[in-house]
Image (cartoon, rainbow, N blue to C red):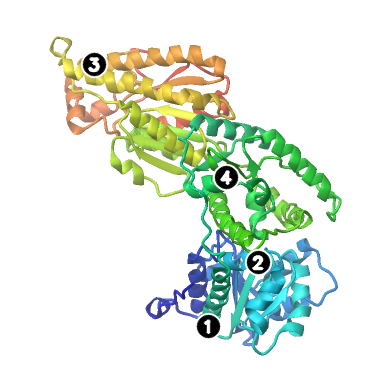
């Protein structure tokens, strides 16, 4: 491991907290040290209050901040002398500790101080860095892990046995650190937890962390336990309906929809097919920080019922050791290892599934290295249980509140690069869904930069392209709950006697056949939607009220409308509801170029401005208006409606 320190880069971080911010980010950039909000850093500063009285302030990383992107505002300032005194108490409950830290935070609006704040306070150094280095965990979680750590570091580190983060750990360190620390001590190892470094200087503290972890890496290399290969594991071909079925079953166990991220790369497949996977994968997570997000153990294969029974047994075996009776029992796994799917990571959001995937990728390295040292040793059940049903974690769950209406669900929108399609993507994202956008325009891939959006360039008249897009969608999110058929074209205006055969064929191919192909590709997935599948078809006012010169468009949209009606009849037995929206005069779409708009206005002997508001309410209809209704049709208000056709047109004289 090498230092990432750069003088020019460091110079950009100014102010008293600048060096602390910079070195925290350096640690956060290395995923073998810190993952997704894990790790912790702090600095002790002397500051004056409004009365000019000087005192010591501990700035510690606040809850919810990621070290890779942390800013000065991400550090919570607390009264150092008071926090240090807390460590001398004979006992302190975790909720009370959190209260004391909150009431002695010195800045309104600051993030909640870390549960490790007292631990940072009692260490007698200005800068303190804490990571969950993979290399150190591999060693401490192997046979004779404590002795190995002592052999590697000698008197460079203080070694603390495993204790769950919080007051008890801080109190133990307050007793043990002065007793063990020599003049050569530059760090501390918390067995099965992580490693600390400290110094009076930010750069030195950071580079001491690099040095300590490098020593662990060199030890593993010397023991031939660093780069552990796995047997070749060629992918069997992605089984998207099998993945969707797994997601369906896990969601049923959880009691609400979950996303599922599948990874069948050789690394994950190789581990899922490891000869001893049933043993090495069931030993628990690499570090306590991973417990909540990955559960103590992954599910093996696809037996959700079996996992639930095993988890109930785990709960019953450990509940008697909890300080209070626990009532929350979640039998759904956070992840599964399957010899054909590789890793399946579950979560309410795409961010959650990405976190689980990345955490377990590092866990695989830790497990295999520890195995190479003689055997993987994780936390005992009683420890992982205490973390999973920790008062503070249960309080977080209660505080989170009601999730968005489409949390854990997946929507697919065709023609999503602009107009109504883009507005639909925004509407579904706004309601908490993960969204897959399809469009011929390559810009679809970068339309939104967020983990719950997947944009795929796809020609919807190409069966192979549709199949590939569906595989990609299920790999990322696990299935499909909602489908919006929006893609279409509006051919140039032509009288019936002049219709070009190619123009007619193009309208039918794009507006009818492409939608049929998408429906066929999606049916098996919609059947497996945890809350039943939903389809919204973006039709047209031209279906009930065709316009002059629009025979090709009107006929193709009428054919699509009949396709949707028949599908509603046939798919009702699968619980899939299909409804249609008939918009009109929506001019902020790709269909309505200036030329087409002028042509249609001329056909009605109207100006363009008159044509824009050519409805009973004399109002303009926007893409957002249509999209919001499309999303609403997939929600609970329309739960008992299928086969409906709803106009969004400001009122059309021919139809009222």
Location of mark 4 (residue): 272
| Residue 479, numbered circle | none
Q: Which residue is mark 1?
A: 204
Image location of residue 318, percent across then percent down: 82, 50
- Residue designated by label 3: 552
Task: Indicate the quadrant where residue 127 lies.
Answer: bottom right
343, 432: nearer the viewer: 343
Name the outermost residue toward the bottom: 183
C-beta proximity under 8 Å, tags 4 and 3:
no
Q: Tell me if residue 92 comes above or below residue 150 in the rendering.
A: above
Mark 1 neighbour density, 10 Å: few (under 14) some (14–19) many (20 or more): some
Q: CA distance from mark 4 to mark 3?
A: 53 Å
- Say whether residue 104 is visible: no
SS state under label 1: helix
Of callouts 1 and 2, which one flags the residue occurring earlier in the amino acid sequence? 2
Determine the secondary structure under disc 4.
helix
Question: Label 1 vs label 4: CA separation?
Answer: 41 Å
Position in image of residue 648 (x %, y %): 40, 24
Looking at the picture, tell me which residue is in the foreground, 73 or 457: 457
Nearer-the-camera pick, 495 or 197 = 197
Q: Residue at x 52, y 42 (%)?
A: 261
Q: Residue at x 65, y 42 (%)?
A: 299
Residue 342 position in % (x across, y down): 53, 42
Q: Mark 4 or mark 3: which comes first in sequence?
A: 4
Q: Secondary structure at mark 3?
A: helix
Would you name the residue on which mark 2 appears? 114
Residue ID at (79%, 55%)? 382
The numbered mark, 2 or 3, whose residue comes first in the sequence reads 2
């Amino acid at each position: 491991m090498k230092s990432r320190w750069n003088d020019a880069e460091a110079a950009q971080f100014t102010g008293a907290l600048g060096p602390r911010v910079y070195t925290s980010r350096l640690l956060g950039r290395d995923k073998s040290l810190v993952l997704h909000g894990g790790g912790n850093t702090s600095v002790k500063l002397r500051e004056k209050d409004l009365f000019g009285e000087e005192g010591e302030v501990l700035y510690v990383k606040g809850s919810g901040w990621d070290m890779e992107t942390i800013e000065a505002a991400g550090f919570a300032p607390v009264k150092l002398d008071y926090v240090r005194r807390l460590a001398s108490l004979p006992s302190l409950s975790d909720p009370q500790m959190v209260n004391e830290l909150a009431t002695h935070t010195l800045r309104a609006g600051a993030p909640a101080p870390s549960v490790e704040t007292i631990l940072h306070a009692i260490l007698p150094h200005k800068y303190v860095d804490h990571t969950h280095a993979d290399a150190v965990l591999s060693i401490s979680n192997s046979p004779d892990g404590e002795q190995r750590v002592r052999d590697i570091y000698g008197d460079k580190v203080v070694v603390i046995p495993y204790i769950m983060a919080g007051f008890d750990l801080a109190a133990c360190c307050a007793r043990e650190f002065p007793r063990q620390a020599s003049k050569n001590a530059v760090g501390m190892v918390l067995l099965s937890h992580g490693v600390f470094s400290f110094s009076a200087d930010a750069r030195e503290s950071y580079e001491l962390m690099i040095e300590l972890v490098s020593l662990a890496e060199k030890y593993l290399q010397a023991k031939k336990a660093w780069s552990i290969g796995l047997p070749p594991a060629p992918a069997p071909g992605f089984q998207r309906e099998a993945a969707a079925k797994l997601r369906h079953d896990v969601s049923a166990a959880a009691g609400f929809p979950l996303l599922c991220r599948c990874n069948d790369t050789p690394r994950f497949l190789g581990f899922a097919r490891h000869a001893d996977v049933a043993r090495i994968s069931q030993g628990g997570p690499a570090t306590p920080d991973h417990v909540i997000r990955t559960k103590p153990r992954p599910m093996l294969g696809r037996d959700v019922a079996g996992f639930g029974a095993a988890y109930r047994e785990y709960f019953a075996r450990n509940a008697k050791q909890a300080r209070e009776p626990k009532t929350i029992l979640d039998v759904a796994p956070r992840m599964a290892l399957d010899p054909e799917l590789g890793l399946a990571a579950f979560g309410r959001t795409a961010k959650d599934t990405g976190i689980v995937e990345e955490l377990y990728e590092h866990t695989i390295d830790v497990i295999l290295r520890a195995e190479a040292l003689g055997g993987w040793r994780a936390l005992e059940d009683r420890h992982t249980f205490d973390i999973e049903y920790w008062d503070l974690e249960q309080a977080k769950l209660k505080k989170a509140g009601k999730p968005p209406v489409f949390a854990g669900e997946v929507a697919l929108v065709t023609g999503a690069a602009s107009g109504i399609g883009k507005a639909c993507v925004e509407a579904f994202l706004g309601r908490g869904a993960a969204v897959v956008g399809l469009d011929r325009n390559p810009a679809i891939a970068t339309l939104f930069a967020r983990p719950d959006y997947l944009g795929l360039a796809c020609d919807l008249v190409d069966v192979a392209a549709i199949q590939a897009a569906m595989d990609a969608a299920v790999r990322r999110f696990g299935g499909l709950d909602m489908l919006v058929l929006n893609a279409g074209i509006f051919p140039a205006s032509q009288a019936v006697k002049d219709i070009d055969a190619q123009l007619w064929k193009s309208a039918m191919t794009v507006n009818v056949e492409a939608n049929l192909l998408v429906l066929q590709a999606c049916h098996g997935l919609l059947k497996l939607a945890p809350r039943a599948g939903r389809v919204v078809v973006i039709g047209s006012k031209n279906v009930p009220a065709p316009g002059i010169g629009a025979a090709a468009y009107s006929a193709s949209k009428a054919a699509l409308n009949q396709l949707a009606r028949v599908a509603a009849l046939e798919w009702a037995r699968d619980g899939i509801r299909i409804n249609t929206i008939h918009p009109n005069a929506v001019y902020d779409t790709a269909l309505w170029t200036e030329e087409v708009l002028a042509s249609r206005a001329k056909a009605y002997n109207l100006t363009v401005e008159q044509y824009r508001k050519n409805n009973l309410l004399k109002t303009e209809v926007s893409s957002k208006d249509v999209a919001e209704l499309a999303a609403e049709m997939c929600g609970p208000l329309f739960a008992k409606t299928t086969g409906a056709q709803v106009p969004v047109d400001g009122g059309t004289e021919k139809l009222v």
